Image: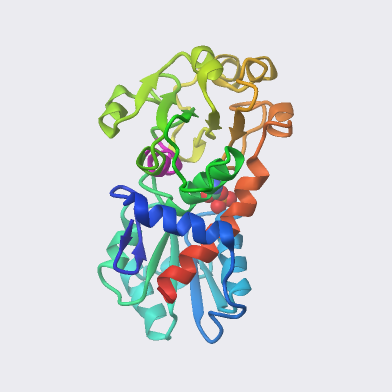
Amino acid sequence: MWNDKHLISLGKTDATEARVLLSSAHADTYECGILAGKSVANLFFEDSTRTRLSFSLAAQRLGASVVDLTGKGSSLSKGESLLDTAWTIEAMGVDAIVIRSSQSGASDLIARNVKVPIINAGDGTHQHPTQALADALTIGQSMNRTDGWDFRGLKIAIVGDVVTSRVARSNVCLLQTLGAQVTLVGPSMMTPKSFEAMGCKVTHDLDKVVCESDVIMMLRIQFERGGGAVLASKRSYHHEFGLTAQRAEQMKPDAIVMHPGPMNRGVEIAGDVADGNRSVILNQVTNGVQIRKAVLHHAMIG
Ligand code: CP
């Protein structure tokens, strides 16, 4: 998970490292102002609400100052390269760089070329480690697994546009490392069998999976990455692969509904289900701040 002080991917997650970070985020007992005098650069070259604001709030709540840069209005629009941008920001003396990019591998490229900690806030279709960590924190809290963060025996379904989803890739790695059994569900073009190489199951029968799962994590169709290009209609997708109110009624009594956001209400999830009593979607958002505090603390202090 940690590569030196960088957090790029959960591809080779060490369960102990992940559990230490989850415990730290759950306890939230950081010394007030522990990052005072330090600065974090938030480079968001792709749109974001949750991740960008939660990294800013996390840094500020630990006492660090934050500078923001987006693609529009930066010198990237004049042709400056990603690496020149990173070197320029590092030369200004920041203590950590958080980066979101539409290019898979962008944060890894920067991490291999700078000295300050790099935290991947989502790179293309590759990885979104802090979202998966926030999700694991939410699952642990909702399922009373905070004592040891051992997810053995939990059945977790990740449903929808998996093929374009960095959230799904990070979650498959992390949740299986913590012991959960993960099943990917969706139309065949969104959930190819090749994902079984990651150790999870793949199926196209949502109704069967809904009745058996402890956690159902719905994914947005990422229209901006070409997801859904082959769909007949949003209506037919909702009927076949959406978490409708009728489907949610078939869930196990204590099962929970998750979504990393942003949601397409009425497409992958019915509004009533998103707002219903099984939903922990806003807990995921709250935990996004908690986990990013833990990540920034680890990256900058150790
Ligand atoms: N889940 C997530 O990454 O949301 P944002 O795109 O709003 O940051």
Q: Quadrant of the C terminus?
A: bottom left
Residue 184 position within the rendered picture, expressed as x and y whole percent measured from the top left: 42, 26
Res. 293 visible in picture: yes
Residue 39 position within the rendered picture, expressed as x and y whole percent measured from the top left: 51, 80
Q: Residue furthest front?
A: 147
Camera-side residue: 87 or 63? 63
- Indicate the quadrant where residue 50 lies: bottom right
Q: Which residues are magenta?
A: 164-172
- Indicate the quadrant where residue 272 lies: top right
Residue at the location (65% across, 39% down)?
280
Residue 66 position within the rendered picture, expressed as x and y whole percent measured from the top left: 56, 75
Residue 11 position within the rendered picture, expressed as x and y whole percent measured from the top left: 30, 47
Residue 276, relative to residue 291: is it above or below?
above
Main SS of residues in magenta:
helix
Magenta stretch holds residue 170:
yes
Res. 101 visible in picture: no
- Left or right of 150: which side holds 234? right
Magenta stretch holds residue 215:
no
Residue at the location (32% across, 50% down)?
13
Residue 215, relative to residue 107: is it above or below?
above
- Indicate the quadrant where residue 171 lies: top left
According to the image, what is the colour scheme of the structure? Answer: rainbow
Residue 210, relative to residue 299: is it above or below?
above
Camera-side residue: 215 or 97? 215
Camera-side residue: 140 or 67? 140
Residue 152, relative to residue 112: is it above or below?
above
Residue at the location (31% across, 67% down)?
110
Q: Quadrant of the N terminus?
A: bottom left
Count the marks: how many? 0
